[in-house]
Each structure stands twice: as structure tokens, then as C-alpha cells.
Image (tube, grey):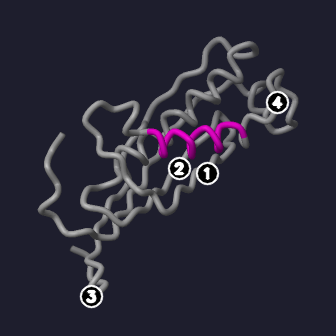
Amino acid sequence: MVDVSGKKPQLRVARAEGRIRLAESTVALIRENRTPKGSVLSTAQIAGIQAAKQTHHLIPLCHPLPLTKVDVELHLEDLGIRVESRVVCTGRTGVEMEALTAVSVALLTVYDMCKAVDKHMEIGEIRLLEKTKTDLADGREA
């Protein structure tokens, strides 16, 4: 683990996104809430939030961080689902791994919940959209 004890705490924000391609029939099942395992969107949202909170247990050299906000949004599109996360904390290191983990686990949850009805799903385009750090004393971005 990197020693961050010499860094001053800052407001840290990271956003990430990813997609899963689905068959049109699978999108219809999700839209109508008729998948065998239940509500795909709400389950994947909760899974993504939980994953962000557990990132330090999953990625060996990540610091445990006191997250103050985790948002995970799933957007049903014609050919799949787009997931976007936003993670916030006040700390000495960034939250990009937490944002990326939230997206990844939300997408994996969709996959798990739809694998019985769709054999050709494809997860991809997982990427960091933005990360910022803001000094707490004056509110200016660092």
C-alpha cells in the first residue's frame, strides 16, 4: 500500500461508466420486470453501491476509504444497459477504483440475473469519466 499519511484530506469525487449489450427480448423482459430473478435494475443498483463500499476487500492494495456518497444509475437503452457511478469521500486518496468497481459489479449483476434468458450478453466500455479533488480549506479544485 502506498503511504498517504503525508497528504492532506481533500474532497474526492470520481465518476465511471460501462455498458452491457443485451438482446432486444432481454431488454423487453427487464423493462416489463419479468426476468426469472426479479428486478434487474434495482438489484444491480444495490450491488454496485455495496461493491463500492467493499473495494478495499476486492483490490489488494486499495485503501479503505470513508465514502460519504455512492450513486449508481442504470439506464435501460434499446440494446442494453448503461451504468454510471459517482463516488464521493473526504480523504487522502482518490475514489476512482470505487467508482469503477461499482460499475463493474452492477454490470456483472445484470449478467447474472439475465444469463438464463440471454446467452450472448457482452460487458464492455468500462471507463473512468472524471476524477476531481478539492481542497477543503478554500473550496478550490486541486
Question: Residue 51 at x, y = what percent?
Answer: 51, 39
Residues at marks 4 and 3, CA–CA distance in whole angstroms: 47 Å
Judge the density around disc 3: few (<14), some (14-19), many (≥20) Cα neighbours within 10 Å. few
In the picture, the quarter occupied by the C terminus is bottom left
State the residue at coordinates (54%, 22%). 122
Q: Secondary structure at mark 2?
A: strand
Amino acid type for the residue under numbered disc 2: Glu
Specify whether residue 16 is painted magenta: no
Q: Secondary structure at mark 1?
A: strand
Amino acid type for the residue under numbered disc 3: Asp
Taking the image as shown, residue 136 lies to the left or right of residue 5, namely right
- Say the numbered circle drawn on residue 73: 1
In the picture, the quarter occupied by the N terminus is top left
State the residue at coordinates (61%, 51%). 73
- Say the numbered circle drawn on residue 138: 3
Specify whether residue 44 is painted magenta: yes
State the residue at coordinates (49%, 45%). 53
Q: Secondary structure at mark 3?
A: loop
Residues at marks 3 and 1, CA–CA distance in whole angstroms: 31 Å
